[in-house]
Amino acid sequence: MYECDINRMEEKIKTFSKFGDTGHGGITRFSLSPEAIMARNEIKSRMTKLGLDFKTDDMANIYCTLPGTDPDADVIMSGSHCDSVRQGGNYDGILGVMTAMEAIETIVTQKIPHKHPIQLVVWTNEEGARFEPAMMSSGVVTGKFDKATMLASEAKDKPGYTFGQALKESGFEGSESNRINPKKTKGLVELHIEQGPVLEDGKYDIGVVEGVCGMINYEFTFRGQADHAGTFPMPYRKDALYAASQALIYLHQQFDNLDKKLVYTTGKISCHPNIHTIIPDEIKFTLDARHQDPAVIAKCVEIIKNMPKEWARCTMSYEEAWSRKTVQYYPQYIDDVEKVSNEFGYKSLRMYSGPGHDAQYLCDIVPTTMIFVPSVGGHSHCELEYSPVEWCWKGANVLLNTLLEIDKQ
Ligand SMILES: [Zn+2]
């Protein structure tokens, strides 16, 4: 077993936390922003100093390659993203980049023999915080998104300014021929923070990620009658907000009976006309539900379909906004992560990811898995996001030895 250097790990975290520092514990580092360019230049200079070959593709995805002893062997990839949400933390995405850099630095400095080329990869615009959608460039190279549509995506804060322009100005636009070649790729391992409280709660060191939870997203509409709040006696009312609240409680009661791993959220609601003297006549709310087992998701859908179409004298309708099937990672690599973790004496937990990650798209074209590092308090996408350096270093150790394990296969 080879160990990474905890001091180097700490230095990396400190350095990258400067690019987009908000001054109160987090960063704002939108994809291809000046702050992200600083992070990219730092990655480039560190990797080229270690003797790696640096390339970008036409979506500015970064590939830094350390050759192995067999020049014809397929590439083993590891990495994540270096962009953040507004006032995000110092770990989401970038920890997967920093641990891959640390693993590679350890291989170089300890002269660890390996047959396959080992490659750091940094996917452009994972967050979709400025240019939608999320996981944009891993989506393009895996054929999920149309490139022309992505290039036309406009900045949320600057109408008319497109992702395509930002890409041109970034200096990181490369050639399409540099994109990941699935035929020449042995596999990919992405390390990421958990972004939830489960690992810390159970005092686990490592999450062995088996896949990404499937999810559904529905939008409900309740229609009643707008009338004067002062003149209408209660029995005559068709109050759409009251109807929607009854239905929401019903959904919670039904979903709570399904499975304790099911998570579901109503995060968006609109009320019309939203005036305090008028009985609401239209309410819309969303329902996002996630679970690893498609059978549980199917039960959620069944509950929705069997709901009464009338609530408190108001009508109810719904539509599926979008959904995603459960993604299963590559069984051999999942076992490798678990085995390596056990050999270090780390306590690990097999689990599914709730959030989406670049790896779930890559999983469709190359054997893929993920490693989770615990998040203090489960906080993420905020400045409270934190994982102590020792936890990050343990993750880097598992990543390094998993890459070396894959190298033997
Ligand atoms: Zn992320």
Image (cartoon, rainbow, N blue to C red):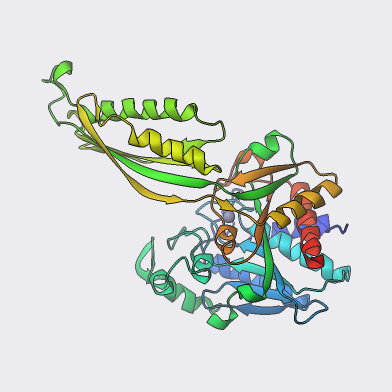
**Residue that lies at the very extreme toward the left in this rendered image:** 231
Q: Is residue 173 left or right of residue 12?
A: left
- Residue drawn at x 53%, y 79% is 173
Q: Report which quarter residue 19 is drawn in.
A: bottom right
- Residue drawn at x 82%, y 66% is 408
- Residue drawn at x 51%, y 47% is 214
Q: Is residue 232 left or right of residue 361?
A: left
Q: Is residue 117 left or right of residue 44?
A: right
331 to 123, vertically: above or below: above
- Number of labels in the image equals 0
The residue lying toward the viewer, choosing from 319 and 128, is 319
Question: The N terminus lies in which quarter of the figure?
Answer: bottom right
Residue 324 drawn at (x, y percent): 47, 51
Question: The C terminus lies in which quarter of the figure?
Answer: bottom right
322 to 34, vertically: above or below: above
Residue 379 visible? The answer is yes
Residue 38 drawn at (x, y percent): 61, 69
Q: Quadrant of ligand 1?
A: bottom right
The residue lying toward the viewer, choosing from 367 and 273, is 367
Residue 279 drawn at (x, y percent): 18, 28
Residue 276 visible? The answer is no
335 to 363, vertically: above or below: above
